């Protein structure tokens, strides 16, 4: 089980905002995996739930990535959508238990984590594309 680094919410959000979809973070500026994992855990703790979107080269990669993120963030669900060939976009909402897998022709690869909160003081923001392998082996 992953143990997050001590990090306040503002630092976590600043770190995660580096990954907002439009452009890749330059390789020499990418935070450590441990720091990214800690930041994700911090925003998880300040939101009611998270919706996951995964852009991957294959369905099996997307599903495995989703399962790693879900396990690391404390979700028990492990959806098993029917696989399709080629690059995919997988979306999973743990609140509704709805999982959707479709063909994806874009070039981005990674995980979008969309934090959902009823309270305006908590986190309502989407971060990503985060690394596909961020929670592998944690």
Image (cartoon, helix red, strand yellow):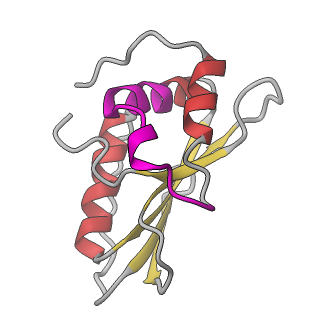
Q: Is residue 70 left or right of residue 112?
A: left
In the figure, is residue 100 to the left or right of 86?
Answer: right
Range of the magenta residues?
A: 22-41
Asked whether residue 111 is in view, the answer is yes
In-front residue for pair 81/37: 37
Q: Is residue 23 found inside the magenta-colored segment of the image?
A: yes
Locate the C terminus and report the quarter of the image it occupies: top left
Magenta stretch secondary structure, dominant: helix
88 part of magenta stretch: no
Which corner quadrant holds the N terminus?
top left
Picture residue at 48% right of the left edge, 33% below the top: 40
Q: Give the residue at the far top of this rendering.
A: 6
Q: Residue 58 location in percent, x, y? A: 28, 77
Q: Residue at x 32, y 66 (%)?
A: 62
Q: Where residue 66 sits: x, y (%)? A: 35, 55
10 left or right of 31 in image: right
Q: Quadrant of residue 123?
A: top right
Image position, residue 68 (x, y; %): 28, 47
Q: Which residue does the image show at 51% across and 57% down from the upper left?
A: 24
């Amino acid at each position: 089980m992953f143990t997050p680094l001590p990090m306040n919410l503002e630092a976590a959000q600043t770190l995660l905002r580096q990954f907002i979809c439009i452009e890749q973070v330059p390789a020499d500026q990418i935070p450590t995996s441990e720091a990214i994992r800690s930041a994700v855990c911090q925003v998880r703790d300040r939101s009611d739930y998270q919706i996951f979107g995964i852009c991957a080269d294959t369905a099996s990669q997307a599903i495995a990535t989703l399962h790693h993120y879900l396990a690391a963030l404390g979700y028990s669900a492990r959806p098993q959508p029917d696989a399709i060939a080629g690059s995919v976009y997988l979306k999973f909402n743990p609140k509704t238990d709805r999982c959707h897998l479709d063909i994806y022709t874009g070039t981005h690869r990674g995980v979008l984590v969309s934090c959902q909160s009823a309270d305006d003081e908590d986190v309502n923001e989407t971060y990503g594309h985060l690394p596909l392998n961020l929670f592998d082996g944690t």
